[in-house]
Image (cartoon, rainbow, N blue to C red):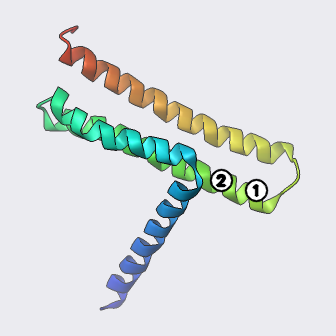
Amino acid sequence: MGKPVNRIWRATCNTWRGFCAAVASEAAMRQELAVLVFAVPVAFLITPDPWKRVLLIAVHVLILTVELLNTAIEKLADEVARDHRPLIEKAKDMGSAAVAGTIVIAALVWLLALGEFAGLW
């Protein structure tokens, strides 16, 4: 394998290890992954439009992505300072707020899709 292929392979392995570590250590990751597994077939049931299906699934992938970033912030913060530090606490709270924001976006997208499916608009 050439250099670019080796680099891509190593990056893929690192990505997989990081994802597995987050799933193993964070209940929120496991819950959000379960919602994604449920959401994929439901997206195919409620809309025939491929772009809407992609959007319904993508908002859940976005939640997982932001949760991964939040988990990374929390793990790093816990490693850097084991004692209570106000700035680290704020950084962790901001990461949590980012996850909440993506959940709101996902909820709005799904409400619109479900409303359309139900014939409300």
Q: Quadrant of residue 76?
A: bottom right
**Residue 54 image offset from top left, x and y in percent:** 24, 40
Quadrant containing the C terminus is top left
Label 1 packing within 10 angstroms: few (<14), some (14-19), many (20+): some
Label 2 – label 1 distance at C-alpha: 9 Å
Does residue 80 lie above or below 108 as drawn? below
**Residue 38 image offset from top left, x and y in percent:** 31, 38
Does residue 78 lie above or below 4 as drawn? above
Residue name at image x 54 percent, y 43 percent:
28
Extreme residue toward the left, this view:
48
Question: Which-is-in-front pick, marks 2 and 1?
Answer: 1
In the rendered structure, find residue 78 and report the number of the disc placed on it: 1
SS of the residue under disc 1: helix
Which mark sits nearer the N-terminus, 2 or 1?
A: 2
Extreme residue toward the top, this view:
120
* Residue labelled with disc 2: 73
Residue name at image x 45 percent, y 46 percent:
64
Residue name at image x 54 percent, y 58 percent:
24
Label 2 packing within 10 angstroms: few (<14), some (14-19), many (20+): some
